[in-house]
Image: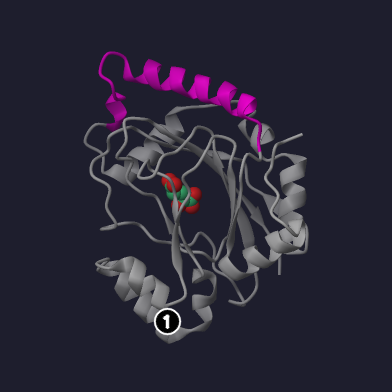
Amino acid sequence: MSRRSRRPGGAEVHAEFFIDRGYLRLEGFHPQKRMTAIRRTLLDEFKRLSGERGMPRALHGLPVFQQIGKLSSLVKYPGLHEALMTRELVDEVTRLAGRAPTAIQGAQLLLSPPQQGSWTLENLNWHVDVKARPADRLPGIQAFFLIDDVATHGGATLALAGSHRVGQRATAAASLREALRTPVDLERKLQALGMTMVEMAGRAGDVFLMDMRLLHTPSVNATKHMRMMATSRCLLDG
Ligand SMILES: O=C(O)CCC(=O)C(=O)O
């Protein structure tokens, strides 16, 4: 049994929070022991690829966010999907969505090498992975898994809680685009739009479930530790 934290009110409070903010953090959803086994293999793979150089040769000279895609494609962990996207988690997704996913994409690693540079809100890659049609209908729920502890500014995915409703408000969408382009005083500007920035940092075993209409982006790993996360998308038909 996982040691998932339960807030007062349980499932209903979870669902209300998810509908309002567009995400939910399930602390300690997966047991630490399961994450440790995956983490060890990933670290061994990283060392094997790096040799004496401290960084895999294939990453040299690549822009920060391309390093994530490259490193994640070089490392394999057979059984990753089954270890992370468990029946219990699919049930949680189904409860939140109010219907079962029609397709679940295989889990993909999200690995960032250590010390990518200074942490910044400049030049991030804010995006959504699917178009919601109609805009007020949940198109899917994306799960983000913490395989290792991820510290603040340790390369965790960033998401904009509340941005799932912006598709229905053209003026807010324009203000948001402008705020993200010039991210000075960003927290205050987001607050004025009813949004908050969520950094998916936390402990190994935590899972974040995200409404796929939420804007999200990779971030810079400014720490000395490799960022070890994974993701899987649960798609919902009309
Ligand atoms: O944390 C990351 O590397 C970003 C992940 C992302 O944007 C995605 O999976 O859609």
Horizontal and vertical percent for residue 133?
60, 74
Magenta highlight range? 30-59
Secondary structure beneath dot 1 equals helix
Residue, x 27% and y 13% (percent of image)?
Answer: 52
Please name whichever residue, 187 or 176, is drawn nearer the observer in this view of the structure. 187
Does mark 1 have its CB less than 8 Å from ligand 1?
no
Horizontal and vertical percent for residue 63?
26, 43
Residue 214 relative to residue 93: left or right = left
Residue topped by disc 1: 172
Q: Is residue 32 above or below residue 51?
A: below
Please name whichever residue, 55 or 188, is drawn nearer the observer in this view of the structure. 188
Residue 172 visible, this orientation = yes
Horizontal and vertical percent for residue 186?
31, 67
Q: Is residue 15 above or below residue 52?
A: below
Quarter residue 24 falls in: bottom right
Asked whether 230 falls inside the magenta stretch, the response is no
Please name whichever residue, 22 or 4, is drawn nearer the observer in this view of the structure. 4
Main secondary structure found in the magenta portion: helix
Q: Is residue 210 above or below residue 70?
A: below
Horizontal and vertical percent for residue 238?
71, 70
Residue, x 61% and y 31% (percent of image)?
Answer: 80
Quarter occupied by the N terminus: top right
Judge the density around disc 1: few (<14), some (14-19), many (≥20) Cα neighbours within 10 Å: some
Asked whether 35 falls inside the magenta stretch, the response is yes
**Type of the residue with mark 1:** Ala
Residue, x 63% and y 63% (percent of image)?
Answer: 18
